[in-house]
Image (cartoon, helix red, strand yellow):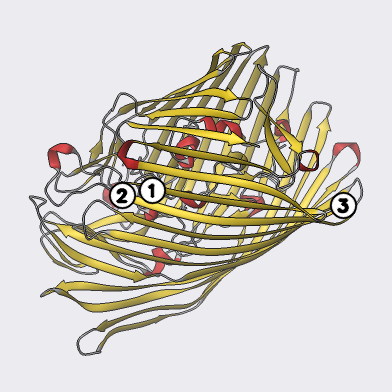
């Protein structure tokens, strides 16, 4: 069943949008050290840059689906058990706070879901699901699904523990324990991870200032699930999290902290009606330092100290699903989310100290109501029609800058409150002319408000200075797709066309090149760039998705997926030189090939190959990142019925994966060969 497209469970064959579902076992077996790395087996999924959460700064972990304008602020909504994971202040996603050992699965809905979810679901939905606390995983019979769900009542206390270690002094421990308590269950989850990391700068460009990008994170979570009566279930969740990273030089560090809690209710009120509700609160702190490195990379000068970014998110949602006659179905609901945050930072470094302080931020509220109706129009033809109305409001926008030595107020901006309403309709058709064929077509309109970070916070990375813009307009997208799927025995083929018209896309647009002092961005050093967040009038993102899955033997399955993506700026009055340029960070061709092979009863192999075309680092298409072919390999050996040894070799051939290129020619590279081994046990 798929729940992410309409917020109500429905068979995947009835969903008119492109959906990929990955089981928890698939995600754990993927030959990668990170969860976001595992999701890259779907070519349509990418982060802002090619590096994943093993080494990437949290602000670069925004999600893009089908290359719909990658940026640090996600244009896709990421959810964990129905609660947004997108950062309240910046929109990026801290992937390291998501469990991997206790995931039941993931759903990726490309180009759909905006009617059900609203703001930030511009490019689609990525939803992750934690295992039900009242279930456990046990080994099943050989040559069948390797794990199956067993009710905890028949087995008492259950759990899973995974311990791994490997290259770059990487260590990880993650576990989950399910405890029967009274008439309910308590689930305890936790992880502790650390790595010395690797140098982010390419070998030929490294200097004495460059060092490995070490990181460590840990989190602890608890879930209590209790039946309150027939057909009514309560789930209470709490999580605390902390991550610390070094970003490649001694001065550049960041620190993330979060406390989270939610309460959810699910009810089955008869055969024809079900509903669910959730309320949640999130409080987090973020701190980060940035520097400018000299040409020989032997010294660095502090550029800014973002010493505190307090942010909170409060939200609630209710969804009802009515099952009608003749297989008709209606889902409807309402939701509310408030985010508040500000950046507090020191900048303008002179004579060994920062001379200025900046405080900037505000509040965003979004309230939405939606309805979706599905019904068969004929025996093999099913239609979906829906609409959503959102009301957003931004308040208390402010930016204050102070001279630290004298206390003189240098800037004191208070921005006018803004508000508006957005309508997001969608429609889809699914036609099954024969048992082996499925044809689908869908269209939607969607929107995204710029994040507080985009509106209020200027920033500097190296010699690149980017100014905020409080006048940013709302992004809007009109999307359409058409797909055909054919299943013939052990072979499944799929093909899809997609088209997106993205209006007022927020981009970091180059407006100055150093050295010199310029309007808006101020002083830009030699070799540096001055940029401002601006709306691009029109961007077109269109392409083709192809997929194939072949299982010639019960012990062998092969997959192949390909994405062609033409992402081009079509019109922009503020930066006419960008018309015809490709969007930064979007390769034209991406492919992934994978296999699951069990050559003997106790051994499983999961190789994967990813092919990435060339792409551009910058909006002007002057800084090119080379193509890459990345080979990963995973293997496991079943030691006992409940214990296995597993091994992963990420980037097995040690291929060069360029992840960044600066205006002065410095190249950053992604994960080199990363070998990890570990033991996983269930009880």
Most foreground residue, 654 or 50: 654
Residue 1 horizontal side relative to residue 207, left or right: right
As helix, strand or loop, the secondary structure at mark 1 comes to strand
Query: Looking at the figure, which quarter contains the N terminus?
Result: top right
Query: Looking at the figure, which quarter contains the C terminus?
Result: top right
Badge 1 or badge 3: first in the primary sequence: 1
The residue identified by callout 2 is 214
Q: Which mark is residue 231?
A: 3
Q: Residue 419 falls in which quadrant of the image?
A: bottom right
Badge 3 or badge 2: first in the primary sequence: 2
Whether residues under marks 3 and 2 lie with C-beta atoms below 8 angstroms apart, the answer is: no
The residue identified by callout 1 is 194
Badge 1 or badge 2: first in the primary sequence: 1
Q: Position of residue 310 (x, y in %)?
A: 44, 71
Q: Position of residue 379 (x, y in %)?
A: 84, 26
Inter-mark Cα distance, 1 to 3:
43 Å
Label 1 or label 3, whichever lies nearer to me, is 1
- Tell me what residue is drawn at x 79 percent, y 54 percent: 184
Label 1 or label 2, whichever lies nearer to me, is 1
Q: Position of residue 579 (x, y in %)?
A: 32, 45
Label 3 or label 2, whichever lies nearer to me, is 2
Inter-mark Cα distance, 1 to 2:
8 Å
Q: Which mark is residue 184?
A: none
């Amino acid at each position: 069943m798929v729940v992410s497209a309409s917020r109500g469970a429905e068979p995947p064959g009835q969903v008119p949008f492109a959906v990929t579902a990955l089981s928890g076992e698939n995600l754990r077996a993927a030959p990668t050290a990170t969860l976001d790395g595992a999701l890259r087996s779907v070519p349509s999924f990418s982060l802002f840059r090619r590096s994943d959460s093993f080494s990437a700064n949290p602000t670069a972990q925004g999600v893009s689906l089908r290359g719909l304008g990658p940026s640090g602020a996600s244009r896709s909504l990421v959810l964990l058990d129905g609660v947004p994971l997108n950062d309240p202040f910046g929109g990026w996603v801290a992937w390291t706070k998501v469990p991997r050992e206790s995931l039941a699965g993931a759903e990726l809905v490309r180009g759909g879901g905006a009617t059900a979810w609203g703001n930030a679901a511009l490019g689609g939905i990525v939803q992750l699901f934690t295992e039900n606390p009242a279930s456990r995983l046990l080994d099943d019979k050989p040559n069948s699904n390797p794990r199956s769900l067993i009710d905890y009542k028949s087995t008492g206390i259950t759990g899973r523990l995974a311990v791994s270690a490997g290259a770059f002094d990487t260590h990880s421990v993650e576990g989950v324990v399910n405890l029967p308590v009274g008439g309910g269950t308590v689930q305890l989850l936790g992880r502790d991870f650390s790595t010395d990391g690797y140098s982010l700068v390419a070998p030929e460009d490294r200097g004495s200032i460059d060092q490995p990008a070490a990181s460590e994170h840990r989190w602890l979570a608890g879930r209590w699930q209790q039946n309150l009566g027939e057909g009514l279930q309560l789930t209470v969740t709490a999580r605390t999290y902390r991550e610390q990273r070094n970003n490649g030089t001694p001065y550049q560090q960041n620190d993330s902290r979060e406390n989270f809690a939610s309460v959810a209710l699910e009810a089955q009120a008869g055969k024809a009606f079900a509903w669910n509700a959730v309320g949640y609160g999130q409080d987090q702190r973020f701190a980060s330092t940035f520097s400018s490195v000299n040409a020989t990379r032997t010294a660095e000068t502090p550029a800014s100290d973002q010493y505190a970014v307090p942010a909170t998110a409060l939200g609630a949602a209710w969804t009802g699903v009515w099952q009608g006659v003749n297989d008709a179905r209606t889902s409807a609901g309402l939701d509310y989310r408030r985010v508040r945050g500000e950046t507090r930072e020191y900048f303008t470094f002179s004579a060994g100290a920062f001379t200025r302080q900046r405080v900037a931020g505000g509040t965003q509220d979004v309230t939405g109501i939606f309805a979706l109706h599905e019904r068969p129009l004929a025996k093999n033809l099913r239609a979906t029609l829906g609409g959503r109305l959102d009301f957003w409001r931004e308040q208390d926008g402010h930016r204050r800058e102070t001279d630290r030595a004298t206390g003189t107020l240098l800037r004191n901006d208070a921005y006018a409150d803004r508000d508006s309403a957005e309508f997001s309709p969608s429609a889809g058709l699914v036609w099954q002319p024969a048992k082996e064929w499925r044809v689908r077509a869908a269209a939607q309109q969607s929107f995204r408000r710029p994040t507080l970070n985009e509106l209020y916070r200027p920033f500097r990375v190296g010699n690149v200075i980017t100014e905020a813009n409080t006048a940013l307009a709302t992004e809007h997208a009109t999307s359409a797709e058409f797909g055909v799927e054919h299943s013939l025995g052990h072979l499944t083929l799929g093909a899809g066309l997609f088209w997106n018209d993205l209006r007022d896309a927020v981009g970091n647009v180059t407006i100055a090149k150093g050295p010199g002092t310029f309007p808006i961005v101020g002083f830009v050093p030699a070799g540096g760039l001055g940029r401002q967040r601006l709306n691009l009038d029109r961007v077109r993102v269109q392409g083709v998705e192809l997929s194939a899955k072949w299982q010639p033997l019960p012990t062998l399955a092969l997959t192949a997926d390909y994405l062609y993506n033409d992402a081009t700026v079509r019109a922009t009055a503020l930066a006419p030189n960008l018309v015809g340029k490709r969007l930064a960070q979007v390769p034209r061709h991406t492919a992934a090939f994978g296999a699951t092979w069990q050559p003997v009863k106790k051994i499983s192999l999961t190789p994967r190959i990813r092919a990435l075309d060339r792409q551009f680092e910058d909006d002007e298409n002057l800084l090119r990142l080379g193509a890459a072919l990345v080979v990963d390999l995973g293997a496991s050996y079943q030691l006992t019925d409940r214990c296995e040894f597993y091994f992963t070799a990420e980037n097995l051939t040690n291929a060069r994966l360029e992840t960044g290129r600066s205006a002065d020619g410095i190249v950053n590279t992604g994960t080199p060969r990363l070998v990890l081994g570990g033991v996983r046990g269930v009880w």
